[in-house]
Image (cartoon, rainbow, N blue to C red):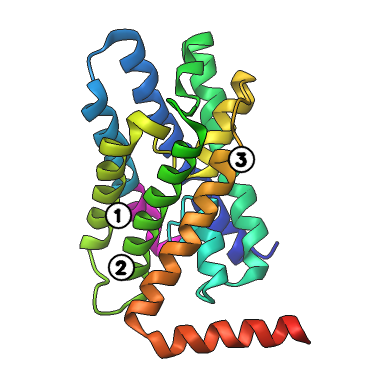
Amino acid sequence: MNTSLLRRACAEGIGVFALVTAGCGAIIVNAATGTLTHIGVAATFGLIVMVMVTATGHISGAHLNPAVTLAFAVQGHFSWRSVPGYILAQFLGALAGAVTLHLLFGSSASAAVTLPRGDIAQAFGVEVLLTAVLMFVISAVATDSGTQGQLAAVAIGATVALDALWGGAVSGASMNPARSLAPALVAGLWDSQWVYLIAPCLGACLGAGCYQLLRNPISAIEVSKAGKQKEMK
């Protein structure tokens, strides 16, 4: 791993560490005290994402999410060579955050584990939809010069909060494999965790593809054809 990639990966790790400690920490505190409520938890996730996008965006692009990194690579906006380093850093940051919460709150930290609230198929569908919406917004503010600026972090953080407000009661509104798998690993709770690995990745690629198609339909079609030609070869 070269110095530049290492620096960017470290920024990603720190960003995801903050995301897990603040967001999942809010879930744990609310489960114990009831003071934050569902709205407060959703707001906490949105605020920490907004803050960390602002703090690390100029260093790493502030993906803060393996699904986002994967979607950017699929769309050709991120080097595949950097994908393993980013995803490893994101998972390590999330794991460090989950361990920190376990040390602080003990077994109560298991409240932060993302689990379907009801039907698994419904939770899977909601996670795909939530992540698609999030990635659509991220694609707009990250890849389109007409929408880039200081409001990018606000737009992304607000989308996370909005998604969590309506989807949290159904699927937990993870939208992020690292955010879900790390607390599950530390708590030893693996029930239906495949949902939070597959659905966000699928949703992110769908959201990025929809934005690309809307913004430049000809380029999107050409990219699709080029991919098929490579597969045939």
Q: If you read the primary sequence from the N terminus, does the residue marked by circle 1 or circle 3 appear first?
A: 3
Q: Residue at x 29, y 9 (%)?
A: 33
Quick one: 99 or 182, which is closer to the camera?
A: 182
Q: Residue at x 61, y 40 (%)?
A: 92
Q: Are marks 1 and 2 in contact (CB under 8 Å)?
A: yes
Amino acid type, label 2? Val
Q: Are marks 1 and 3 in contact (CB under 8 Å)?
A: no
Provide the residue designation for mark 1. 156
Q: Image quarter for residue 7?
A: bottom right
Question: In the image, which is nearer the foreground, mark 2 or mark 3?
Answer: 2
Provide the residue designation for mark 2. 141
**Residue 124 point in image, percent of width and height:** 49, 42
**Residue 211 point in image, percent of width and height:** 36, 72
**Residue 188 point in image, percent of width and height:** 64, 20
Which image quarter is the C terminus in? bottom right
Q: Image quarter for residue 58?
A: bottom left
Vertical side of 81 occupied by 230: above or below: below
Amino acid type, label 3? Leu
Magenta span has 58? yes
Provide the residue designation for mark 3. 92
Which image quarter is the N terminus in? bottom right
Give the total number of marks visible in the rendering: 3
Element under disc 3? helix
**Residue 36 point in image, percent of width and height:** 23, 20
Q: How far is the residue under mark 1 from the one under mark 2?
A: 8 Å
Q: If you read the primary sequence from the N terminus, does the residue marked by circle 2 or circle 3 appear first?
A: 3
Q: Is residue 198 left or right of residue 19?
A: right
